[in-house]
Amino acid sequence: MVSRYCSSFSPSLLLLILSTLIFFVTISVSAQDDNDPDQRYQDCARQFDCGDIQAAYPFWGGDRPIHCGLPELSLTCNSTTQTTFITVLDLTYQVLRVDTANRILTVVRTDYQRGLCPADPSNTTVESTPFSLAPDTQLVTLYYGCSLLGNGIQAPASLGRFDCSSSNGNSGDYFVTSEDVAGSYEAAIRTLLGRCGTRVTVPANRTAVAGLEASPTAERLEAAIGEGFGARWTANDNLCATCQASGGQCGSNEGSFTCFCMDRPYDSECSRGAPGPAAAQTVFPFLFSSLFASFAAALLPLDGSLTGCNESFSCGTTITNIEFPFTGGRRPHYCGLPGFNLTCLDNSITLITINSISYRVLRIDESRPTMTISRSDLHDTAGCTRDVQNTTLAGSNFTAAANTETLTLFYNCNYTSSGYGDYNPPNLFTCNLGGESEAEFYLAGEVADDVSSMLRSRCNTSFTVPISDAYAGVMANGSLLSPALRAGFDVNYNDSYWDDCFRCYEENHGACGFDSDSGNSICICGDRLCPGASAGAVAVLAGISLCFWLFVRQRRIKKAAQIMSKDLSTPPSSATKGRTTPTTNYSMTTSSYNTTTTGSGSVRGGGGSTYFGVQVFSFDELEEATENFDRSKELGDGGFGTVYYGLLYDGRAVAVKRLYENNMRRAEQFMNEIEILAKLRHKNLVTLYGCTSRHSRELLLVYEYISNGTVADHLHGSRHSPDSDLSAWRVRMNIAIETADALAFLHASDVIHRDVKTTNILLDDDFHVKVADFGLSRLFPTHVTHVSTAPQGTPGYVDPEYYQCYQLTDKSDVYSFGVVLMELVTSLQAVDTCRHRHDINLANMAVSRIQNQQLEEMVDACLGFDKDYAVRRMVTSVAALAFRCLQQEREMRPSMNEVLATLRRIERENDGGGDQKAEVVDIVVDDDVGLLQNVPPPVLSPDSVGNDKWVSFLSFLLLLLTHSKVGHSSTKKFIFDH
């Protein structure tokens, strides 16, 4: 092995070694024996086999190496019992069944196989993993250590009790199904059980839970959990099917999908995308420079100055004997990793700084490895701080643990004794930061968009802080704010050098360190590098690894360019100017997947790099454009990120979306939004100006700035005013038409928006529509009528069939648009918990009112529904159209083209006809479907109604009930993905 002592070698010998390494690396990469199958192909042709469990991609384990599956989907086999286990987010499950056809694992938590009282009860979560809960899965909520309150309260029928060893005469342990918790029983449960020590959710099979609800006993609970639950996996399903169809074996390399074939690996399918000599020529300079840099790092003089790494960090009685990867105290910076520096105050308080925010370190568990921290500025201040910035771990070495919830603190709120309009904060507290007491309050858990928008209009400042989920369930008690903040929250940290450090200790009795210049771990014996384990040798190996990685990456990029990338279309010529079609606006031209450079390469100079045909901005430029992402520039939240106002060098006003986290999934959403928006051009779609590189330290999207807010702002948000232009029905009618036009264009271009809502409909100064937020797209399989994907979207707008069956079609957008239409008619929010419980959901409320002939009770009074007959007629017709869109079964809904045609017809037939009177027909119908009464019947599609005739609502319903199923297109579609 090359060691640091090679500094005494002659230059000619070093050059010989360097040349030899380059030669053998290049030969080993480019030359393979064509007669022998690739070893990785043979590896991945084998299945994981353990007892009754057989599994292939995306799983690995046993005889299947890690490159045969996703790194996080490792199966292990107990050879004695022939049972299979998988670990997901630190929880271990036994695998009971593998349903490859439906991609469902049936698993059971091992800590609940031994009874209902695990040592450390915790929630079952599959977020941020390849898994989602199967449709036949239902959650059961378990309450541990609950204080009893007496017998004066009626318990829910499904409440059951079990006993753990920790229980005593004054406490108990209970369980209830999640449906009851989500319904009206939550308050009753908490009142009955008092303050429970722990509350966790555990999935179970829905059939087993049904039996449990009928007889809620501890025995049935244990049996229901023991039957396991279904976890559906999603892992490059389309790519894998393509690979297998070409004769390959599915696998992964460097976190990307790889198709292993008989001759060598490919990016998607066998016998395509072979890199030619140009690829080797491209990578050769990387080989040379990387190895040269490695040798340069190997010759750095470090011996004799590496002291202190045998020391440990201790502070007080809680944080003791802390070693690698942490530094601080008597441990110099080279004794650990960057970002892990600890500071001890008064030998009692341990601090760490993460993303410029200081935290108290309450506990460090090196065995897991996790750390419990709390924000220093909130630890002893009861939630009051001047440093109002969101707590973010993005880009750091730490990630929030699964048992973490989000707490939102609202500061300097305009609070009166009557509350905040329709909203009365449950957790009010006050701060005295500037000599005056100001009203503040907090909310635990996720805050809905409409609630967040309303609160932001009444509070000057808000920010988020993670807390332990043990406190999230009891935050209605205002006195628990301070304990929740002091208790902190858990973060996981990644010690990727653990194996190296273990070998360092076992083989050399050394201490682990880190060379920040080479970016590699080092093994220190006393005050110098251990013999045979020098940083130079590690650097050379790292250089060789880097060469392989660069070569594989170059091939993957080249292949991806051939398959996935499509450039912007050529601008239409004068002969086609003015004709907007999916063909002219949605280019299918193939171009380079990676970044291309034009002109001088300077973004400021107007040339610069492009990504899918849009400009690539530097992070520094956008940071300067937004004044370092000043909170005063914040426009709002949504689509996985916060949006800021910015001003570019060329004077363009822009909206910069800053994604919350730079994890793998966010990067995928980032790429998808660019690919979709770059190819779609429509007057009512927001324009994407550019983005940062996917390798930038943060993922940023740059849009045209739309200055007049959103439709939601004007209807029931910060811009709502009786004098607003939106109080005129014709303005709202135009918004409906332009939004429908944009969605019809998307559907014609084989794109499903999947998150249609009024907060995603932007308005310019003339109240023209710009539909925004394309963050969730993926390729819709060819020759299918729908796609199965875990439901996402905004509560109140989600297609019920999509939510129940996981099947997404373009009719899902139609349902959401029906909700938007009713918002335009009523000015009510899609979801409002302050309304009667039957009316919380606007869609349900609208269907009920229309069926019961009570539309006039919902219509916004400012529209002149009772005074202007033309408005009355148009509003009624639009409500009838919304009624069609909101049908539970998607076959009963119109297509987006039908919706657009109907809206245009309503507008056209009412132009100039506002003073005409039409016959009003009262119709009595059966109980199945209620009709509008004493109002003109709705205008139907052009094929359904004559130009000058009104038809009865009964005809409309007959059309609705007999409407033939729309034929499903076999073209490619894009959908918004999980």
Image (cartoon, helix red, strand yellow):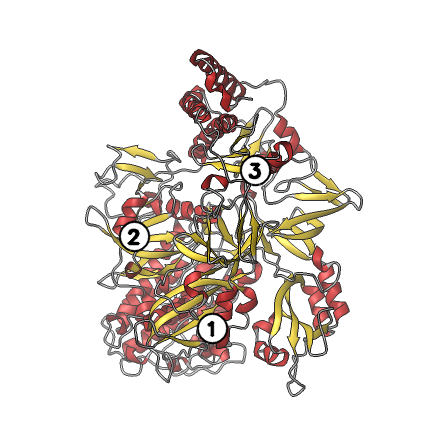
| Residue drawn at (59%, 28%) of the image | 261
- Residue closer to the observer: 594 or 849: 594
- Residue closer to the observer: 457 or 918: 457
* Position of residue 39 measured from the top left corner of the image (x, y, whole percent): 63, 26
Q: Amino acid at mark 1?
A: Asn
- Most extreme residue toward the left is 651
* Position of residue 512 measured from the top left corner of the image (x, y, whole percent): 55, 38
Q: How many marks?
A: 3
* Position of residue 676 measured from the top left corner of the image (x, y, whole percent): 38, 47
- Image quadrant in which the N terminus is located: top right
Q: CA distance from mark 1 to mark 2?
A: 39 Å
The mark nearer the N terminus, 1 or 2, is 2
Identify the element where label 2 is drawn: loop
Find disc 1 in the rendering and name its residue.
841
Q: Amino acid at mark 3?
A: Ala
Q: Is residue 136 visible?
A: yes
Crowd tier of the residue under label 1, counting other residues whose Cα lies within 10 Å: few below 14, some 14–19, many 20 or above: many
Q: Amino acid at mark 2?
A: Asn
The mark nearer the N terminus, 1 or 3, is 3
| Residue drawn at (22%, 62%) of the image | 765
Label 1 or label 2, whichever lies nearer to me, is 2
Q: Residue 628 bears which disc, if any? A: 2
Image quadrant where residue 797 sits? bottom left
Q: CA distance from mark 3 to mark 2?
A: 40 Å
Image quadrant where residue 828 sits? bottom left
Find disc 3 in the rendering and name its residue.
511
